[in-house]
Amino acid sequence: GDLASQFNIAMAVEADNMKMVFRVFDDLYGNGIGYLREVLGLSVADINNLRQLYLDD
């Protein structure tokens, strides 16, 4: 149980970090999605998957 709780805490931190990263993208590029598509070469489906993983509240 201890390992699971540590993992959950780590994942919560990761999710917060990703939210911050998306906010930085928005500030820098005006549109984080445009950045992800152009720079990382992600498809719209990839981006939607990321959003569901990290941005669902």
Image (tube, rainbow, N blue to C red):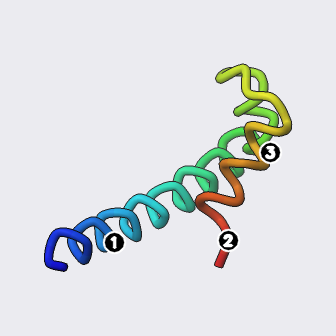
**Relative horizontal placement of residue 45, taking residue 11 as reference (left or right):** right
Q: Which mark is residue 8?
A: 1
Query: x%, y% of residue 45?
Result: 82, 39
The residue positioned 71% from the left and 33% from the top of the image is 36
Residue position marked by numbered label 3 in the rendering: 31
Q: For the residue carrying disc 3, how many other residues have a C-alpha within 10 Å: few (<14), some (14-19), or many (20+)? A: some
Q: In front: 33, or 28?
A: 33
The residue positioned 78% from the left and 41% from the top of the image is 33
- State if disc 3 and disc 1 touch (CB < 8 Å): no
Q: Residue 23's quadrant in the figure?
A: bottom right
Give the vertical position of 56 relative to 52 (above or below).
below
Q: Residue 12's quadrant in the figure?
A: bottom left
Query: x%, y% of residue 29?
Result: 73, 39
**Relative horizontal placement of residue 28, taking residue 13 as reference (left or right):** right
Which circle's residue, 1 or 2, is located before the other in the chain? 1
Mark whose residue sits in front, 1 or 3 = 1
Q: For the residue carrying disc 1, how many other residues have a C-alpha within 10 Å: few (<14), some (14-19), or many (20+)? A: few
Amino acid bearing label 3? Asn
Residue position marked by numbered label 2 in the rendering: 56
Amino acid bearing label 1? Asn
Query: x%, y% of residue 30?
Result: 79, 45
Which circle's residue, 1 or 3, is located before the other in the chain? 1
Amino acid bearing label 2? Asp
Residue that protrudes farthest toward the right in the picture? 44
Q: CA distance from mark 1 to mark 2?
A: 15 Å
The residue positioned 65% from the left and 79% from the top of the image is 57
Q: CA distance from mark 1 to mark 3?
A: 29 Å
Q: Name the element at disc 3.
A: loop
**Relative horizontal placement of residue 44, taking residue 20 as reference (left or right):** right
